[in-house]
Amino acid sequence: QAQFVESGGGLVQTGGSLRLSCAVSGIFFGFNTFGWYRQAPGKEREFIASISSADLRKYSDSVSGRFTISRDDTKAITFLQMNNLKPEDTAVYYCNVVFQSRPRYDSWGPGTQVTVSS
């Protein structure tokens, strides 16, 4: 059973940066595509970035050019570098395996809260 533990969130001012980490266990890391998602208060969870086993990256329009996804297969961790943060980036951030453009597992980690003040 896949397990995800996100960390690195916090409170930052507009224009600031954060680096999120997601430690993955219970599955073989190397073959999978991993994605980051976020959920703002009162909104549905949305996809923001993914990285395949071949380092092919995809981003939502809302974060493209500001966020960078990466992975460390030796440590089974995926990262999300977030720069030029905006108040609309405020949300709880989660990671999951991406399969056929959807999160594969129903069991999500605790997430990590990102709050961007104006």
Image (cartoon, grey):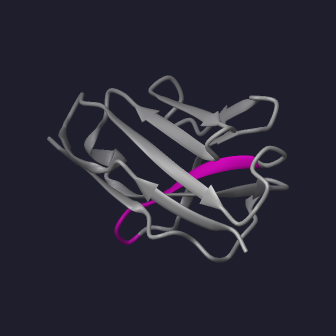
- Nearer to us in this view, 66 or 24: 24
Q: 110 or 73, which is in the foreground?
A: 73
In percent of the image, x 42 and y 44: which residue is there?
Answer: 20
At 57% across and 63% down in the image, what residue appears?
4
Residue drawn at (65%, 61%), measured in percent from left and top?
A: 25
Q: Nearer the viewer, residue 65 or 20?
A: 20
Judge whether residue 40 is colored magenta: yes
Residue 55 located left or right of residue 5: right
Boundaries of the magenta span:
33-42
| Relative height, residue 39 to residue 66 (above, below) | below
Say which residue appears at 55% left-offset and 54% top-offset: 23
Tag count in the figure?
Answer: 0
Task: Please tell me whether the stretch drawn in magenta is mainly helix, strand or loop.
Answer: strand
Q: Where is residue 15 in the image (x, y as percent from the top left)?
A: 24, 28
x%, y% of residue 103?
Answer: 71, 62
Residue 75 percent across, percent down from the top left: 61, 42
Image quadrant holding the C terminus, namely: top left
x, y percent for residue 72: 63, 35
Q: In this view, does 15 lie to the left or right of 19?
A: left
Whether residue 38 is in magenta: the answer is yes
Does 14 sit left or right of 36 as displayed? left
52 vs 97: above or below: above
Q: Which of 85 and 35 is in front in this view?
A: 35
Hey, which residue is sitting farthest front in the picture? 74
The N terminus, quarter of image: bottom right
